[in-house]
Image (cartoon, rainbow, N blue to C red):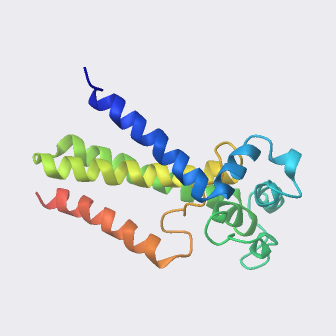
Amino acid sequence: AGLSLAECDFFAAVVGAGGIILLYPYIARRFSAWLHVWDYADSLGYQQTRTMMSFASGGMLGVGPGNGNLKNIAAAETDLIFGVLGEEFGAIIALAAALSVVAIGIYGFRLIKNSTCLFDAVTVGGATVQIIFQTALNIFGSVDILPLTGVTFIFVSIGGSSLISALMMLSFFKSAELH
């Protein structure tokens, strides 16, 4: 009696995760600070604690574009962009950016529901989940609800490859609209 497909998948995921941690030990260090960044405010939790303080200092309306302090922290324009939005443009704009991704998600799920083509439903579903999951990792990672993973905030973070892949995912939405 061999392993089931689900057991093989689980085993492969565990081996893959272990391999990644061996090849990239800084990932394991990020997980060790997760939910305890204030205990490591001067080391492993430096980026996240500064992000949370900067977001709070921005208040509802922000300190103005380019006037924030978070821009001086490494990877602020990619990994910590939610904090930059909150500091420079305020909590209202940061929340609006997050809600715009939620709106994309709702639109994607409506396209899936109304799709007559299985290919369109599957591709739109995958793109929708990817967009929502990636944005959630960025937002919740910057405020220590999830581990800081270093993924970008779709359409907000600096990075050409992120923008290109996001536009490619939205092309599945357009394809589903046309069918």
* Front position in the image: 171 or 177: 171
Residue that appears at 27% across and 31% down: 5
Question: Outermost residue toward the top?
Answer: 1
Q: Is residue 80 left or right of 39 when viewed as pictured?
A: left
> Residue 118: x and y, percent?
13, 46
> Residue 127: x and y, percent?
33, 54
Residue that appears at 37% across and 46% down: 106
Q: Is residue 172 left or right of 130 when viewed as pictured?
A: left
> Residue 39: x and y, percent?
88, 45
Number of numbered callouts drawn: 0
- Position of the C terminus, as image quadrant, is bottom left
* Front position in the image: 10 or 52: 10
Q: Is residue 153 left or right of 107 when viewed as pictured?
A: right
Residue that appears at 28% across and 44% down: 110
Residue that appears at 68% across and 54% down: 142
Residue 10, relative to residue 146: is it above or below?
A: above
Q: Is residue 52 left or right of 167 when viewed as pictured?
A: right
Quarter of image, res 114: top left
